[in-house]
Image: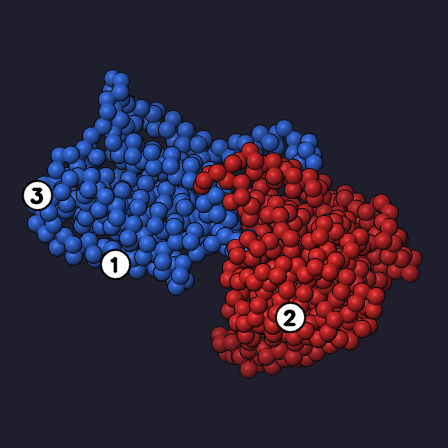
Chain colours: A blue, B red
Amino acid sequence: MAGDSDGTGGFARFTQFIWELRIIIALGVICMALSFASPYFLLERNLINVLRQVSVNGLLSIGMTFIILTGGIDLSVGSILAFGGVVAASFVSTAYKDVPSIHHLGAIGLGLLAGVLLGTVNGLVISRIRVTPFIMTLGMLSIARGLTFIYTNGMPVTDLSRDYLWFGQGGWSIYGDWFLPVPVVVFLLAFLVAWIVLYYTKFGRYVYAVGGNARSARISGINVGFVIFMVYVISGFLCALGGILLTARTSAGLPQAGVAYELDAIAAVVIGGTSMTGGKGSLLGTLMGVLIIGVINNGLDLLSVSSYYQQVVKGLIIVGAVMLDYFQADSDR
Amino acid sequence: MAMTANADVILGMDGAEKHFHGVHALKGVSIQLRRGTVHAICGENGAGKSTLMKILMGVYSADSGNMYLKGNPVRFLSPRQALDAGIAIIEQELTPIPDMTVAENIFLGREPMRAGIFVNYSELNRLAVEILDRIRIRLDPARKMKTLSVAEVQLVEIAKALSYNSEVLIMDEPTSALGERETDVLFEIIDSLKAAGKGIFYISHRLKEIFRIADEITILRDGEYICTKTVSELDQDTLVSLMISRKLEGQYIKENVPGNEPLLTVDKLFSRNRHNPISLELRQGEILGIYGLVGAGRSEFLESVFGVTRPDGGEIRVKGKRVTHDSPYAAIRNGLAFVTEDRKLSGLALILSVRDNTSITSVRKFNKGPFVRRRREALQVREAIDFFGIKTPSERQLVRNLSGGNQQKVVLGRWLLSKPEIMLMDEPTRGIDVGAKREIYKFMSDFAGKGNGIILVSSELPEIMGMSDRVLVFKDGSLAGEVKKSEASEELLMKMAT
């Protein structure tokens, strides 16, 4: 019945519109406040720096969004990131003697493969053996971290090839002080691809359907197990990609890299409005969540607030964002 | 009806108003519940029945209006307060705690204690048996809720509500998950409650039930109070016309003529611990009814046919061709569709939009490579919405916000788009209003009329008899017999099923 009135007036529709934009507005307000508080915040160099800092968490958060949309969780992202990073680094390191040095693109390929492999293990155990995602990825958090230490003998993988380092440190000058770092471009490309997958393919639809009601999805003819399997593989891939960017930026494959990164990734997804029970949420929200965390960390740094306080602030934002969603859900009934 | 308080009125409400998000849900509704009576509240979905009940039990508070309990003004701020004042409810949505036992669920929050700290389990179980005995249900109080059937869970909920010994009981669709036998038990309980001087508000879409047990009927329409009448003043047709304000000719629409060509042949299909070997044939143009009590294996059988559970033996043939349904996907490819018994549990993703729910089975059909052709999708979804007249402000509306009848139409719309030839329908009209029911019957008749086939599972005898060309009766997981349309009677079917 086209043209049916839904009983909401212009004002209600306007408030609804504002509500949907709330995260973007929140980000805008935070940025505005920081630009008043610190003269450095709006400098081109600083803004680029924020983007560079968030690109690794951004990659993890994309994968995390897919997983949380299916109703799962991935606690192993930081460990898989470390493993993928040291594997790739080891193949371009002149200091790491256990494997030959190869072309940097080959090394990156192997690093990505390592991440995909661990993601595959996560996905298989969760979708086939039905171990709950929390338990499986908690186990993988430990397993992948252990493998990373075994692989590196607990030592940083150093002396990486110049071509490889470009992925963390290179970039393109655009105009004046504006500089586009490679990690930012990689993150934005990954985001774009993820966007297309989630909103323009049937796989994306299935992700939402599985998270919305797995039983109904199965009866609708969806291979639920495959969808769940795939999101962990995707996450494994993105973790390794993040690990590669991180090792290239820090010029070393650190076995302890990425500890507790899962928290920031989950935080970004949650701040972005994605429901932990699945089926509800968006990639755009996650992007905003990633930026909010990045901007706050950066802003508090600029204001020389101790990192101890930064953690408190971040925690408050997470809880605050979720509380807002509950208020909305409540008045929805 | 006089609006003044009266000695035998236990609970009364005067001029209740309620708005939600600009929707005027209740427009000055008044109602009075008398001691020792069953007061039915009738109206289509969205008429305001549930909102009114939720105000009476303290879930919502009215924007304005006065509430009286035994002549004294009251206002409940929480269900707990209402419960303490003697108002208990049997809810439409069942809320058991799956890993707790029957007894623990009944006495949740008021377990008998030893020394004030430890739960006295033997006393707990004894009390539970006592209350279950009262409603003549044989259930081990130590069984976990998750091992119970839907009907049994419903009975436990009823036992729980009774255990409060409240003066007022609100029953919102208490029989929607019950078979005929359990329903009879419930009605006997209601009779004894009436005799004990309690008052009962009763909401049900099953009008026959209402005429069987109600004393008074209040009719609501679009949030407005229409009238209150005693049962003897009304008949079913008048009641329906008051509810929907348009006169209905016969309730069932059936124009399809069954042919002889077999469409679906099931040969000795069986599933261990779920149902025994069952053989049947569905012909082109036919609506085949399956009747049976709750727990007779009807839904389980449909699940085997559709590949939801893998059968342990037997054969399925679609138009003579042997097929294996090892997943619903395979069944869908062979032209089957499955409208499940519980649209909230297994039918729909409530937090997703009308569009996402409608296109989910057919999205693979109109995609290009991995990509969804969104414009074609939008057209198809629109087509389904228009076809069933689904009342939704837009296809982006969340299914959660639709009424039960419109939700069920979304399920049908989804299957319409996958273009099936065989539809398995498990209780397709459960808990939906008369208008939507009729539209679904019309769809069934048209669908079968085009040479397709439907297997209809229903616990409602009039529906089974009104819509089916043949009726199969299930009993204890086996096929108990077949009845032709011309021979079918409620008595015969009941006798075969029990």
Which is nearer the N-term, disc 3 or disc 1? 3
Count of labels in the image: 3
The residue depicted at 53 percent of the width and 62 percent of the height is B324
Inter-mark Cα distance, 3 to 1:
27 Å
Closer to the camera in the image, B99 or A222: A222
In the rendered image, the quadrant that contains the N terminus of chain A is: top right
Question: On what subunit does the disc labeled 3 rest?
Answer: A
Residue that badge 3 annotates: A94
Label drawn at residue B389: none
Judge depth for marks 3 and 1 and give the one in front.
Answer: 3
Decide: marks 3, 2 in contact (CB < 8 A)?
Answer: no
Amino acid residing under circle 2: Ser
The kind of secondary structure element at disc 3 is loop
Q: Are marks 1 and 2 in contact (CB under 8 Å)?
A: no
State the residue position of label 2: B279
Left/right of residue B429 with respect to residue A78 in the rendered view: right
Residue B1 screen position, x and y as percent: 89, 53
Instruction: Work out whether residue B5 or residue B252 is closer to the camera in this orientation and state it.
Output: B252
